Every structure is written in C-alpha cells, then in structure tokens.
C-alpha cells in the first residue's frame, strides 16, 4: 500500500466540510480533466484513483466528460458512486447513464467503451465500504444529501 501524502491527508479531512464540497465541485472537475493525462489518472498527480466517464447528455445529445473516483469490480468492471459532493440532487451524469447506459471510460492510460448499470442492493452494500475507504467523505455526502446515492457498475464492452 502506497504511503499517504500530506495533500491526501488534508483533502481527506477537508472532504467532510460543506464549504470544501461547494468549492471543489466547481474547481476539481475542469482541473482534473485538464491534468488527467499528464498524471496518469491521478487528480493533480496525487489522491484517489480517478477515471474520466464520458456520457451522452440526455437533453443535449452532446458528449459530457466528468472525472470520478472509482473502485475496481468483478470481471474488469469499475464502479462509481453518484455522490454529487453531497448535494440533494443526483448528478447529471447519473441521469445521462439512466437514459443511455452506453458510455466511454478512460482509466489511467486505457480508454474503452462500457455499458453502465445500477448496482443491485447487495452489490452496492458490498461496494460501499470500499468507496468510503477510498474517500471517507462519501458517508458524509450520503447523510448530508438525504438521498440514496446511486452506484453504477461500468462493464467493458
């Protein structure tokens, strides 16, 4: 297991603060998209593993790319949590996947098409502790949002 950097420790503590979520939901996605390839799939070269998920907008029909933390799942699949930084509504990318589950994933230096599906209840229960271990603020986001956070499994095609 790799050592945790000072930046990762600080982000882990700040991740629970509401103001941090408000700021980072605006700053992190464009910065992560810009620097993703340079750092081989890490946010700013440090921090939890991140992928780029490209969906088709359910209203616009245009491609939308969002950086997301992920955990590995069975059979080469990846799983992502639609926490939306603890906001009361689901993120747009999760609505896009419900409307059209065909998507594209870039994980590290690999890009592949995938089909997304909602994790089943038992599957989600098994995955959730792994998300919390990756980013402890996920539990804070779940309680703050007051909603059942969607977990999607991204299965390579």
Image (spheres, rainbow, N blue to C red):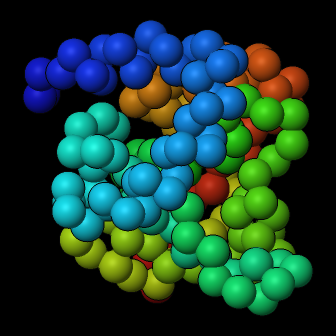
Please say if 85 is above or below 74.
Answer: above
Where does the image place residue 71, in percent across and percent down from the top left? 41, 46
Where does the image place residue 90, in percent across and percent down from the top left? 81, 47
Please say if 139 is above or below 86.
Answer: above
Quick check: 106 left or right of 69? left
Q: Residue placed at 77% from the left, 17% from the top?
A: 143
Quick check: 11 left or right of 119? left
- 60 or 136: nearer the eye? 60
Q: Is residue 120 visible?
A: no
- 125 or 104: nearer the eye? 104
Q: Is residue 143 visible?
A: yes
> Which quadrant holds the N terminus?
top left
- 8 or 96: nearer the eye? 8
Where does the image place residue 94, in percent across and percent down from the top left? 73, 59
Q: Identify the image quadrant of residue 21.
A: top right
Q: Residue placed at 70% from the left, 63% from the top?
A: 93
């Amino acid at each position: 297991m790799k050592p945790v950097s000072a930046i990762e420790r600080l982000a882990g503590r700040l991740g629970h603060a509401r103001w941090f979520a408000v700021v980072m939901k605006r700053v992190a996605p464009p910065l992560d998209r810009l620097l993703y390839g340079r750092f081989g799939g890490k946010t700013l070269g440090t921090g939890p593993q991140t992928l780029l998920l490209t969906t088709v907008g359910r209203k616009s029909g245009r491609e939308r790319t969002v950086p997301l933390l992920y955990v590995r799942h069975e059979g080469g699949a990846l799983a992502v949590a639609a926490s939306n930084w603890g906001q009361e509504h689901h993120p747009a990318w999760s609505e896009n996947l419900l409307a059209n589950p065909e998507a594209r994933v870039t994980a590290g230096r690999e890009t592949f098409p995938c089909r997304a599906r909602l994790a089943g209840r038992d599957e989600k229960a098994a995955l959730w502790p792994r998300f919390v271990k990756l980013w402890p603020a996920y539990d804070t986001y779940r309680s703050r949002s007051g909603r059942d956070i969607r977990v999607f499994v991204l299965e390579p095609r």
